[in-house]
Amino acid sequence: MSTPSVSKGCFVFKPSAKKRKKNPTVEDYFTHGCEDMENSRLRFRTCQSLCEKMKTDTELLQDELNRNILNSLLEFIRKSASAFQRGTDDWGSRMRAHEIPTAALVLGVNVPDHNMTFQSLSDQVQQTVTPFVVSLQAKECSAVKELMQKVLERLMGTSVTVNDDDQGETEHCTTSIGQKRVHCSLKTLSDWYKTVTEKAYSGTPGKKRTSKREDVQPPIVVIFKDLEVFSPKVLQDFIVICSRYVEQLPLIFVFGIATAPSVIQHTLPHSVSSLLGIELFHSLSCTQHLATVIDQVILTSDFPFKLSGKVLQVLVSIFLYHDFSVRNFIKGLQLSLLEHFHSQPLSVLCCRKPEALGRVTKLSHQDVERIQQLSSFMRYVEQQGPQEQVELLTNDDHVKDVCQELLVDLHRYHKNYYPILRCLHVLTSTLPKYPLGKQIRELHISCLEKNVWENDEYVSAMTLLRMMAKEELVSALQKCSSILKHEKTKKMRAALLRLDDLIANFHKPDSVAETAAVVAITSPGRSLQKKTDLFQLQKSLLEMKESRRTKKMSQFEMLRDESLEFIDSLVRCHLAPPESQPLYEVCYYSSSAVLRRHLNATPRTSIQTALSNPYHYLKNENLRTEDGAFTSSAPDICIVYKLHLECGRLINLYDWLEAYATVVSAAEGKDPESADYGKVDELKHARFIQAVSELEFLGFIKSTKQKTDHVSRLTWGGC
Amino acid sequence: MTSNQFDRYAIRCLSSSSMPGPLHHPGYEDNKLQRVSKLLQCRDVQASVLLGLMGEPEQYSYPSIFIYGHRATGKSHVIHTLLKELELPYATLTCVECVSLGLLFEQILLSLFGPDSATLLSRSPSLSDFVRVYKQLCAQNSVKQTKYIVLDRAELLRDMEANLLPAFLRLQELVEDNVTVILLSEIVWDKFRPNTGCFEPLLLHFPDYSKDQLQQILSEDSHPSYSSELYSAFINILLGVFYSVCRDLRELRHLAALNFSKFVEPLENGKVTESETHKLWRNIEPHLKKAMQTVYLREVSSVQWEQHQQMAEKEAGAVRGLSAHGHVELPYYSKFLLIAAYLASYNPARTDRRFFLKHHGKIKKTNFLKKHEKTSNHLLGPKPFPLDRLLAIFYSVVDSRVAPTASVFSQISSLVTLQLLSQVGHDDQLDAPKYKCAVSLDFIQAISRTVSFDIVKYLYDFL
């Protein structure tokens, strides 16, 4: 069995499901421990459909993103195949050494993410160019023999399935393999290839594959998924062998490269790399990939489930700091979705608007109570008049009615939020030093956390916007208007009208004002040149500043201020953080700590917690201690661990044993004055040895040869 | 015949045939030999020595001949042409292809005794199986001619089973048949000789082609639509540029084919006539120099190079080679882990205190310099370091507090998979694994620039 993980560690493979008699479904797990079965079933179904939607959406998106590179790769493969078929007609190709066409595909450092790309590549190649595609992974090819075996197995295997309708062919293939174990050499392959292509050529004309002359010699594509991990010797030998058959077999290689293309030159000497004709292909960088995923899945009002700023921050920082894996990001997203639906009973309302409104009416009394306890709802109640407050706290039906209104408001809020966010991003993303962030996700996070207009960065961004040249400002505003064009809410339509108005005003000729401005700028400039004294210069500059402030604003300046004020008002109106919206808890998942604990596990910290504070996991009241204190009734390993913290790099085993015996005797409640207090008996000795070996297993100590009867510590730091 | 007599015989052959001239041998027809000598340009001496050694078709030949010389000096070409044109029974195989012994034996038997012969071999045959089957087949067919087994890239035989090479060297005795084994290799015989001693083959060296010989050979394949003088002039220019870096005939032929179209471009346009060689030279020379830096090093593929030639001059800078893309994007902490690994690899462990402790006091470099450390650590290469030193440096260089999460540890493994770090010694992960940093100074400087970390300030060598 294999795992796609790059890290080393233990993986648990559960026994296959068939063996168990009755296995609970996922739904049972989900609803386990919930009082309200009906509600949780509903939640589970909503969650599943959302999860499905997210999965298909992101897959579509990834296909879309990969399309460019896949197309160019396919083009390359097709071109190479046709070049092979043209053969050795002209002088140039006869004289040239035959190179194996090779595509070096640079995919970025996250290797597990590549699987999908390779899968779709080989699928597409199989559908459009050739049935002969082999994907190889380094871990299955530790020697040339194995590599060759894998190539042959997969190629000849495909031929059997490809020619399914051709009964004779299938039998022939299997018998030739069955009769005698064929030797894994390329000679076998080239013989096989010859028979297969000849068969296809002389086959019935009705077949699709034989209709065109081109398809008679489909190339053989060998994909090396992770080039870095292949042992250089194996790779070199394989290439040398292949190059000997390059005239009979139309081979094409694809190298999947995680780091940089120069790795080819590091692994292959010139004598081998001169056998390849390498062309470079770059995939989209993973940060761009993430930006698109966020843009399509998170920054949209179509998707009812939302993340709070902190949760998004956790997911993004795992991506940026740790793994660069878009797949893991999506997994994290799905986990938070699941967590949200599992932990928040009111998430039943987290669905599309019409369904949500329907579900509100069916809420039970308990659910209504839950709504009343929501902090955002309580804040809303406090803002109402006293009569209304009483109604909201006592009358279930009234609460449901209000809830419907509030949900509509919430949906409207989202519909307005995202376009305005994009507009603000368009305006600020070109500013120097990116006061509000380069990526839209940064802006989104700061908007989620608090009122964005209260940030210093927002103020400075607005000042910078005021300094923009006319063309830049107008083009940015035009982009905004094109964003708003797609929106359908009333407010957005009104905003669009206003914005178009402003843009039109910008385009109006304002020759008078402009010439005036030119004069104003040039005249002090001329006077500047005359003066040489520093003090005078400063003074004149101050004067100029003064005069500019008092000067009547040009038409452009007035328009600019007007449009920026308009933008500012839009931001203040629509970009308020979700906490300000009543019932936001229904849609927003906010327990970032849970997510962090699940996604970014800290095994070392957990072990240390378990050893130094056993109560944390065992929940045994006897073990409960004040900070830093330690009960002597703790498990042996904890006592041993605690004692070892007090030692230096080398630990004397006998001293350690003595100390342990003393602690354990105290736990047994023996009289400190008695003779056998702290005495080592066989039982204690055995318990001690067991605890020490457990500690060794956990990697805290190891035996050493430096000193007899000592062990060395492997961790640093003490108590 | 004792081996001493054999040596004398070989020397006589060598001395008698050292004069270049048309091949001549009583055992073979003259017209065949003429055809051979036409195919074997500049290798007359070697060919006639070989002919002398082979003797007449039914005479016993020397049991094993070892031929060595650089790449593309015509070793296999000479042998193959001789054997093929003189219609002798032979088996030729490349050892790199023979991933198993069985494959090696099978191919020999197949080409010497026909398609059915290999079925006699067992599943995974040993050497004695091979000898037995060979004898058996030999008894069945009555060919008296000397059989030849040519083993290309014979240096790989050394890595196979220990008895294989000595056995092949005296196969004639083992199978009691008229058979000669010819070994081809790029390295000298001294590197082959097993410790236990073995039968010494006859050694034959193929020297590199001289510049004139290369000129002569390459001029042969002139373009059909141009005169051979023109092509010869082109080869002259080509060799002028490439001879100093490349003497590989195959590669030179490839380069000639790639660049010829550019050479004749002014002729096609009618700007220059064939006689104006200087103008032609001026046109092609910078182009060839560029080819040396790009297509010769396989920075760009030959196809790309040809496309590039067809493009207009102004787009000429567009082709970027493989090594132009040296940039690697890494996650933030991976960058710092790599930086920490680099520091741990190139700084002596004693100096960590000076670099990473706040109050280290003033320690001058000279004060704690040990004698053997005077040479730069960068000249000595990376040194292995334990995991905990890596983590200690990591925590002190990274600017924020980092929890020791599982993903930090898995990033170390990822870096090993990407070959940016390499693991040293044993595979025991529990017992303090050791690593080495496998990246260059330029690479790490580029990485640390992206996280605005001044690595030079932390390197002991640059103090």
Image: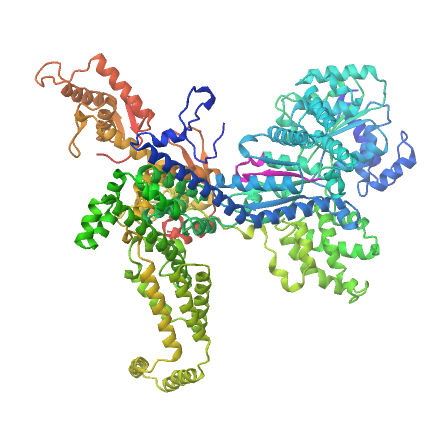
**Quadrant in the rendering for residue A511:** bottom left
The residue drawn where x is 54% and y is 46% is A63
- Which residue is drawn at the image coordinates 28% and 46% (left, top)? A400
Against B230, is A160 above or below?
A: above
Residue at the farthest top position: A682
Up-down relation of residue A128 to residue B314 (above or below) = above
The answer to whether one can see residue A444 in this image is: yes
Q: Is residue A190 above or below residue B454?
A: above
A424 to the left or right of B91? left
Q: Is residue A513 magenta?
A: no
**Quadrant location of the N terminus of chain B in the rendered image:** top right
Asked whether residue A180 is in view, the answer is no
Residue visible at 72% across and 26% down in the picture = A167
- Nearer to us in this view, A560 or A537: A560
Residue A617: x and y in percent read 25, 29
Left or right: residue A576 versus residue B381 is left
Range of residues picked out in magenta: A218-233
Depth check: give the residue in front, A294 or B200: A294
> Which of the 4 image quarters holds residue B173?
top right
Is A225 colored magenta in this rendering?
yes
Left or right: residue A697 compared with residue A667? right
Quadrant assignment, res B410: top left
Q: Position of residue A366 (x, y in %)?
A: 25, 38
